[in-house]
Amino acid sequence: MTANPKIFEDKINKINESMTLYGRRSVLLSVFRFITFILAAGSLIWAIVNKAALFYFVFALSMTVFVILCIIHGKVTAELNFYEALENVNARYIARIKGDFNGLFDLVCRNLKRRDEKEEAIRRASGTEFYVEGHGYCMDLDLFGKKSLFSLLNVSETAFGRRAFAKELLGNDNGVRSASAIKTRQEAVKELSENPDFLEKFQATALLGKMKKDPKALIDFASERKAVNNNHIVIAAIQIFLWFIPVASLIFFSTYIRACVLGVILVNLLLWAANVKANSYYFKAADGMPNQVSTIHKMYSLLESSGLKNGYLRSLIAGKEGKKVTTSLSSLSFILFFAGLRSQPLFAFLINSVFPLDHLICYFMGKWADSYGDSLYHSITNLAEIESLMCASQISFVSAVNSFPEVESSDSPDKNAYFDGKDITHPLLSPDTAVSNSVTIRSDIALITGSNMSGKTTLIRTVGVCSILAYMGSKVPCSSLSLGRMRIMSSMRITDNLGEDMSTFKAELVRISEIIKCAKQDDCALLFLIDEIFRGTNSDDRTEGALIVLKNLSKPEICGFMTTHDYAMIDKTVDTFKNICYYHFSETYTDSGITFDYRLADGISRESNARYLMRLVGIE
């Protein structure tokens, strides 16, 4: 499937028609609800004032109709909310395809009023919480942020789904995934990308759940599987049995009915208060989870009925030991619904004064954990993996040209040090102006020259991003790509740190030293990306330092890219290194200005446009 916003625009038109229909139904039902409620209230008042038995019947009938209308209205409202979420999801697809990140984040913040809510929504959608200081390439390849790979591809609406996708972008804990594992993920991504309607419905369902909170406390509670505390059911039985005392007094000692009721309420409150601390173990696990578990249940219901055929996806959807995930989630959702009812302290106080709600919730939560507790972590982990695969499928929708890469199957490091890409494009570039390039290295180091702003840095970032996408099983924005399985290291965005007494040059030395340390590990191949090496020192030291680095990185199991303006260094590599290839970018000067074609070509460029650009901004 190619990137075509019109597909989603047509879907939005149909969705808007459904929204109009359900909107009208909602208004009509609201009117009828109001009329029936007024009729019921009026009938009751008339019956009481005039002692007219017939109007009690009218009241009962009106209230029955009112309740039925409320139920129907609730379903209509739910449908309307779903279509609104579905419209939002489709609009996000259009924004991604067009590279409109401002529009994308406006959609993320739609219907949010408070500034802190908007900031939190942007933080979640941009993935800034997943920055990792000291990571091999995290800060260099635009993985997170407002205009980032995460923002472009993320369609996960759960905290654990976002975390799983971020982990993929960061390189799966820096491990090198096997070729068979990558192939397995590619097949799953392929089926997901062929089912956009299902992806949209799934995301809209998750979006409605507003799943902001991580369910870690609930998972920990379920995994502990503490022995069921039968004291809960015993105390609950006592509290219920106590109400037989007021009933008996009503029959035999009606004079004491009020005292008996107050006495039972007092005993209930004492029993409730005495166990608040013990019960908090259960309610901490349930805090914020009723709606989330209900939504996870809906998500698994969609998955189980999706008809997806891929074996890996089916294994993720399947429950532990062959049990349907929805079975356990349905029970938990029912229990947590009642836990949500008592979330307000005043309501919890009132309801537990007459009914042992807390004790019953704790007992049934314990019973559920005993029966299904060990499956919750499994279900959440699998759902996170599914959402991560859905994110990986997005290149199919946002890039007009895309294909699955071929990944080296051999485990030999020296056979994995290669990258052969045809028409590769950076997915974050505007689709209207993006220029694709082809580049090949095999146990080589590519030195890339060219003047400022010609496209050197963008190219090596494109290589890095395409490699990340390939290793997570995604399609890549290219016509074809074959590559080895390599660890990725980069040195591009270097900044000083006054707090740690770290100059820019020292910071770059640290980063380069980490690349060299990684190069000395011969357990897997290495792809390095270095932009303008040692720019923070004098020209002689820069040249000698760069040559030392190149010598350390000249190994059969290593390949990489280095951009440079250091022509003295380049001249010394021509006869010294046999594993270096040369690429360059060029530009054209006219009376009206400078023009870049952003086309990679073989050879070395010695052009410089620094003085021209200085004059352009008024520095002469």
Image (cartoon, rainbow, N blue to C red):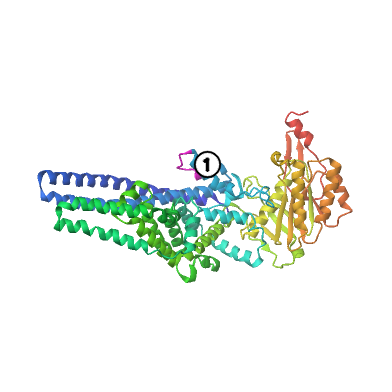
Q: Which residues are magenta?
A: 107-114
Identify residue type, mark 1: Glu
Q: Quadrant of the C terminus?
A: top right
Residue tagged 1: 119
Is 364 on the left or on the right of 43, as rendered? right
Q: Characterize the local packing of mark 1: few (<14), some (14-19) or many (20 or more) Cα atoms within 10 angstroms.
A: few
Q: Position of residue 312 (x, y in %)?
A: 55, 67
In the image, residue 491 sits, relative to residue 420, either above or below, namely: above
Element assignment for label 1: helix
Magenta includes 158?
no
In the image, residue 479 sits, relative to residue 608, either above or below, namely: below
Judging depth in this view, the residue of 400 and 34 nearest the camera is 34
Q: Position of residue 561 (x, y in %)?
A: 76, 52
Q: Quadrant of the N terminus?
A: bottom right
Q: Position of residue 246 (x, y in %)?
A: 20, 56
Q: Position of residue 204 (x, y in %)?
A: 46, 53
Quarter of the image holding residue 407? bottom right
Judging depth in this view, the residue of 333 and 557 nearest the camera is 333
Chief SS of the magenta region: loop
